Amino acid sequence: MDKWTRALPMVRPFYAVKCNPDRALLGTLASLGSNFDCASRAEIESVLSLGVSPERIVYANPCKAESHIQYAASVGVNLTTFDSRDELDKIRKWHPLCGLLIRIKAPDDGGARCPLGPKYGALAEEVKPLLQAAQAAHLKVVGVSFHIGSGATNSRAYRGAVAAAKTVFEAASRLGMPKMNVLNIGGGFTAGLQFDDAAVAIRSALQAYFPNEPELKIISEPGRFFAESAFTLATNIIGKRVRGELREYWINDGIYGSMNCLLYDHATVTCAPLSCASNRGNPTCKGLKRYSSTVFGPTCDALDTVLKGHQLPELQINDWLVFPNMGAYTVAAGSNFNGFKTGAILTYLAYSSSS
């Protein structure tokens, strides 16, 4: 949070709850001043249960169930996104006083790990008709939203998206609509150098296209930037097979659980051994011979393979493999396939007592 505030002080973060809805994480972010991007009734309920004001929530789902729109209206969540006439019809019917952000398709997906443009975002030629439809329905469009894709790798994509948003502000002005005052630059942020590059690109784009706009509220929807490095996954070895120099291990989590990120989030995972049942005097197994190893998940699906050709020392059943940076799009998207329940995975909180 400190890094975000230093790099992008003009942008208010609305944490994307779908990335990791752990209550301890949400509570910590709330106490640090974060707002929240919710995409469903359940996510809104979770955030509100922490005592967070509904004014700190953006309902950033361009296609919502009518019952969820009704609920948002009943609890005072008054900012949402849209990218179609049909969504406008639902909002007019169930939440006509809601402030709206027109979601546009970013011109470039930024080399994103998970592009969102194929599913969401109005095309350039659709913007004016949508603004006119909102105007005719007496709905209040207060700003523009875009998302260059989850896990973006090309920071230059932000500049093109901010430029596209500016054209929408200008189109609304030409239509005589009330001046819009919200720009939602979406998510796609990852920690490290990529965030530094993104921050530079965003500051430059805002200065170029929205200079001297003191009334403009700029918000964003970071998810993995906050969640990824905050969680480490510890898995237990439940099975082993030796085939010559190859070592094969089964662990008690896999792609139908926390490791679903390998499929859905196109993630790359790594692990380190933490030996408990053997090598007690050398828990990190330093200096031991390494073997080419395969790591399987616990289900009876051969697709449930976590790592291949990974170099590991000789390990035994009940030893541990520890996976860092497992907070983003992991447990949140797991299942109960084959009777292995992702919801049963325990989360332990580590607190520092130092001042």
Image (cartoon, helix red, strand yellow):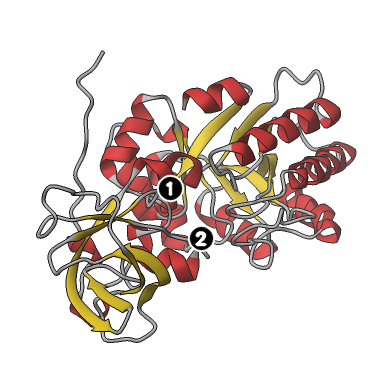
Q: Given the image, on which type of amino acid does mark 1 rest? A: Ala
Give left or right: position of 203 versus 250: right
Can residue 318 be seen? Answer: yes
Q: Residues within 10 Å of mark 2 (few under 14, many from 20)?
A: some
Q: Residue at left 54%, top 22%?
A: 5
Q: x%, y% of residue 59? A: 50, 47
Judge left or right: residue 258 versus residue 318. Answer: right
| Alpha carbons under labels 2 and 1: distance apart | 10 Å
Residue found at the very far top of the displayed protein: 355
**Residue at the (41%, 35%) spot, across then down:** 54
The image position of residue 41, as x and y in percent, is 38, 54
Q: Mark number for residue 64?
A: 2
Q: Is residue 161 above or below residue 289?
A: above
- Residue 72, which numbered label? 1
Instruction: Tell me if label 2 and label 1 are in contact, CB under 8 Å.
Output: yes
The image position of residue 42, as x and y in percent, is: 34, 54
Q: Observer-nearest residue: 136 or 144? A: 144
The percent position of residue 234, horizontal first and vertical second, equals 24, 55
Q: Which kind of residue does numbered mark 2 sit on?
A: Lys
Image quadrant assignment for residue 67: bottom left
Which label is found at residue 19? none
